[in-house]
Amino acid sequence: MAAFPGQAGPYSGAHYGGGAPHGVDPEALSWFQAVDTDRSGSISVKELKQALLNNNWSAFNDETCLLMINTFDSSRSGRMDVYGFSALLRFIQQWRSLFQQYDRDQSGSISCTELQQAFSQMGYNLSPQFSQLLLSRYAQRSSNPSIQLDRFIHICMQLQSLTDAFREKDTGMVGNVRLGYEDFLTMVITRML
């Protein structure tokens, strides 16, 4: 929906009362307007991908962008409004701070050792083999695999979601549960964001 001079469009001052909507940072509104290339008033996965960059200037991957849209899409339309986008920017900034904290060598990516240390500091008791498995799944193929910010966020969001699902079954908090195969599949599928 394009706004012509004298008409209210999705971003005009008339629409937002002369400024950003309540709870939306003005800078987030400005960025939202630039990202919403089709002027629909909401952002698609494709538009989001063009807006988000890793430390090495590569675009965020499709899976992580879809995960973020699904997390911040209050209407369940597959698109994100300005409120969701503003919340997403705050969310990414928090993850970027953590990422930089765990990127001990300041390389702009997280190695297996750094990932293992991050998990430990976040309270997860996971083996180095598990961290290596995640890197083999999510890292670019190279002699020294590491992950960028987008994959770090993706891994951490999935890990938290699956941990929450496990805790629902582990009522005694012992770290073990008995699950039937279909219960396991249901637990994983319903938590895949």
Image (cartoon, rainbow, N blue to C red):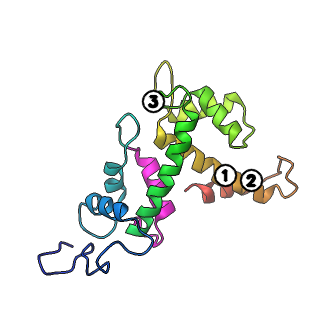
Horizontal and vertical percent position of residue 20: 35, 71
Horizontal and vertical percent position of residue 53: 37, 43
- Residue at 83 percent across and 51 percent down: it is 178
Label 3 to label 2: alpha-carbon separation:
29 Å
Q: Which is nearer the N-term, disc 3 or disc 2?
A: 3
Q: Which is nearer the N-term, disc 1 or disc 3?
A: 3
Q: Which residue is mark 3?
A: 140
Foreground residue, 80 or 122?
A: 122
Q: Is residue 30 left or right of residue 64?
A: left
Q: Which residue is mark 1?
A: 162
Q: Which mark is residue 166?
A: 2
For residue 62, above or below residue 88: above
Give, as a single range, the part of the protein colored magenta: 60-80
Dot 1: what SS? helix
If the image is split into quadrants, where does the N terminus sit?
Answer: bottom left
Badge 3 density bin: few <14, some 14–19, many ≥20, Cα 10 Å? few
- Residue at 48 percent across and 63 percent down: it is 72
- Residue at 43 percent across and 52 percent down: it is 65
Dot 3: what SS? loop
Q: Amino acid at mark 3?
A: Gln
